[in-house]
Image: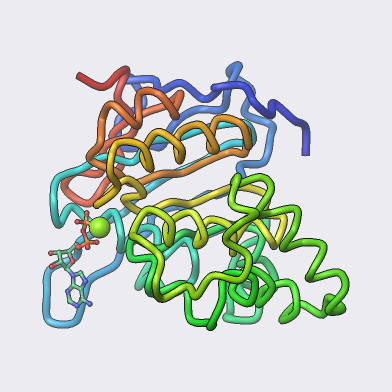
Amino acid sequence: MSGASGVKAGRANPDRQGSGNPAPGGSSSRTPLIELSGVTFAWKGRPPVLEGLDLRVWDGERAALTGGNGAGKTTLLSLVMGLLRPSAGTVSILGKPMLSEKDFGSCRHRLGFVFQDADDQLFCPTVADDVAFGPLNLGASSEEAELKVTEVLKTLGMESFRDRVTHDLSGGEKRLVALGTVLALAPRMLILDEPTNFLDRSARERLMEILEELGLPILVASHDFEFLKRVCGSFLELRDGKIHPLGALP
Ligand SMILES: Nc1ncnc2c1ncn2[C@@H]1O[C@H](COP(=O)(O)OP(=O)(O)O)[C@@H](O)[C@H]1O
Ligand SMILES: [Mg+2]
């Protein structure tokens, strides 16, 4: 895939309402990292929360997903990850249509999904165990996993947390360790759900610095406009079940 890494590309085009954001540089020949076409989803017994939704996230793009409470941001991210399945439409990841759980299983680890609640992501006794879990699960040796833990904790500036009991960490520390668990899998991009919720000022600042330093493509659902303006280069609003590109955030 051709790279535009580190470039805040894919700026929204307000003329393309509801059709997802255009390719950076106007190219239509590149493959998006994520592509949703005509996706419809309804929770049981409820009207559709997403209806005929189109979304593309391009290599090098850092896309903000905004929208009111209950607009469907978390539902949308769950569909991208294959944790929910649409009743209509298609989800393609890294250019491949996701037709089965097997398809999602083979590429889910490439999309570093950080849950809204870090407690949903951390379940091992220590920080090192949590970060090593993914690589071990994908077949890494214990030596390789140990090296990965060292590398990831260094990236996060959390080397001293290696043997800490995960359960005892603060909310901000847990959020960074949750990010570490996905970084350990060398993701192609990051998908973050309300990452600054409940973070104090310094933890939020640290998270922004880390995301900027990582330079990975990002799709991030958040209400925190200051955070989004600093981290993202394109802005999308989820409203009435569809994506509406925004020129800028207020
Ligand atoms: N597990 C669920 N069961 C039924 N309805 C749900 C469930 N999760 C979310 N919803 C509903 O789907 C809609 C979208 O929710 P959500 O995706 O969490 O929105 P957002 O993340 O934008 O706040 C809301 O009306 C919410 O009540
Ligand atoms: Mg949500």
Query: Could you tell me residue 13's position as x and y percent?
Result: 39, 20
* Apparent side of residue 239 relative to residue 159 in the rendered image (left or right): left
Q: In which quarter of the image is residue 31?
A: top right
Pick the front one: 87 or 93? 93
Residue 78 visible in image: no
Pick the front one: 214 or 247? 214
Query: Could you tell me residue 90's position as x and y percent?
Result: 49, 61
Which residue is depicted at the point 63% across and 65% down? 162
Pick the front one: 134 or 177? 177
Residue 64 visible in image: yes
* Apparent side of residue 93 relative to residue 118 in the rendered image (left or right): right
Q: In which quarter of the image is ligand 1?
A: bottom left
Pick the front one: 66 or 58? 66
* Apparent side of residue 100 relative to residue 202 in the rendered image (left or right): right
Which residue is depicted at the point 46% across and 21% down? 11
How many marks the image carries: the answer is: 0
Q: Judge whether 11 appears above or below 46 on screen.
A: above
Query: Could you tell me residue 45's position as x and y percent?
Result: 12, 81
Which residue is depicted at the point 59% across and 68% down? 98
* Apparent side of residue 135 relative to residue 204 in the rendered image (left or right): right
Query: Could you tell me residue 88's position as x and y percent?
Result: 37, 67
Q: Which quadrant would the N terminus be assigned to in this image? A: top right
User: Colour mode?
Assistant: rainbow
Q: Judge whether 86 appears above or below 160 on screen.
A: below
Q: Judge whether 27 appears above or below 216 on screen.
A: above
Q: In which quarter of the image is residue 170?
A: bottom left
Q: Which quadrant would the C terminus be assigned to in this image? A: top left
Which residue is depicted at the point 61% across and 71% down? 163
